Amino acid sequence: MTSADPGRRFRALAVQPQWHTRDFVSADAFRAWMRAQLELARPHLAPDRPNLVVLTELNGLPLVLRGAPWAARLGTFERAAAALFAARLPRTLPLMLREGVGPVRALQLAYADDNARLYLETCRDLAREYGVYLCCGSLPMPRYVRRGRRLRRERGVLTNQTVLLDPQGGLIGVADKVHLTPDEERGGVDLSPGRLEELRVFPTPVGDLGVAISLDAFRADVIGRLEAQGCTVLLQPDANGAPWTAKEGLPPDPAQLRDQPLAWLESSWTATTTGRSIRYAVNPMVVGNLLDLTFDGQSAITGRPEDAPALRSYVLTDPRPGFLALSPWVEDGPTEQLRQTGQDLAARSGHPRENSYHTGVLWADLSLPPRSGSPAPQTDHEEALEALLRGEAAPRPRWPAWVWWVAGAALLARVRRRMR
């Protein structure tokens, strides 16, 4: 494609960061961690074309720890969640009873308005400052409807949600994760599944963007829906909650255990090498141990075999074309050595190499023909988030702490009376 071509030339960047609980215990710590990721990308931003920066899945989930550094010292997420629920009982218990949700979802919803606003405003400011199209990653976030200058939250709903922003910090669109992993369902983080029919493609100067968060990129119904709408660039924010060289066993057949890197070939790589409209995919993966949870992987940017003829692939898999850029794992070696290293890196291993993961930034210069689609109408939720980003509306003000304590005490007294 020559410079006279009317097509799109842009640079895609995938950031592979390492997270720590300390990054989420305060608003300032979170802003610093998010900024550090854009600083990591800064040396690789192209000065002569648009840049698309893609961040990782659930990079807002640990904000549940905000304001409670003591909870981060409890060793496991189960203990931290239980302690936080008890400490925040005056806010969490009314949510459980009023909205019919479990304790983990109630814990997240209790501060969801504050955390969503912090997350969105942080990402807006970074998109503006660095002048990039930004896939913010994802976080557990409510669905909102605007009512004048207030945002009303949809009762009981909390989805794994990605937000796309333009270089002015304006909202491009939103996508919810449709297919949840067992750890995201009622027995884990307790999120609400998104609706397949709401997934849309967003025409931009950096591609006709479709979002398939983690497991969604493995699912034919999601990829098929995005391709039917002309998706050319697939974004797959990811947080793989297991050692990278361990076996995986997700539905529909957990008994069919495979190496995780082999399974991963069924997501972005397959979408770009065998699909119809999808030309490129960007798959950033977060690494690091959060309390007793392990996150690891290899970020990648994939394309058609003819676009990336060099043979390479994830560890534990055979080299193949289709990888435009691929993050190395922490080492190469025989299969059993790699499996052992994955266990050594994992949370609570006690090994000297525990939590010593690889971080970095991948980038690739991409070209596409001129876009032919037009933006889809905004949803009510997107209109609400756009108003928040513009400072035209906000979630309703939080009541003072003493109000929650009084309400909680009254509710507990009522429950005790009924139990007599």
Image (tube, rainbow, N blue to C red):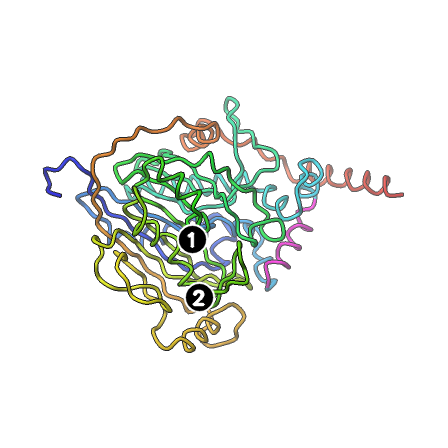
Magenta stretch, residue numbers: 76-89
Question: Most extreme residue toward the right, as rendered?
Answer: 420
- Left or right of 119? Residue 299 is left
- Left or right of 291? Residue 267 is left
What percent of the width, then of the height, locates residue 344?
47, 74
- Left or right of 220? Residue 4 is left
User: For numbered disc 2, what is the local secondary structure?
Assistant: strand
Dot label at residue 176: none
Q: Nearer the viewer, residue 392 or 183?
A: 183
- Left or right of 151? Residue 227 is left
Query: Can you tell which quarter of the image residue 221 is in?
Result: top left
Question: Most extreme residue toward the top, as rendered?
Answer: 148
**Magenta stretch encompasses residue 77:** yes
Q: Amino acid at mark 2?
A: Asp
What percent of the width, then of the height, locates residue 418?
85, 39
Q: Mark 1 vs mark 2: which is more N-terminal?
A: 1
Q: Quadrant of the C terminus?
A: top right
Label 2 neighbourhood size at 10 Å, few (<14), some (14-19), many (20+)? some
Q: Residue at coordinates 45% horizontally, 71% vertically from top-left?
A: 342
List the residue tagged with mark 1.
238
Q: Residue at coordinates 62% horizontally, 35% vertically from top-left?
A: 399
**Residues at marks 1 and 2, CA–CA distance in whole angstroms:** 17 Å
User: For numbered disc 1, what is the local secondary structure?
Assistant: loop
Q: Quadrant of the N terminus?
A: top left
List the residue tagged with mark 2.
259
**Magenta stretch encompasses residue 360:** no
Q: Nearer the viewer, residue 1 or 265?
A: 265
Residue 7 versus residue 215 in the image, above or below:
above
Residue 80 versus residue 161 in the image, above or below:
below
| For discs 1 and 2, the disc positioned in front in the rendered view | 2
Dominant secondary structure (helix, strand or loop) of the stretch shown in magenta: helix
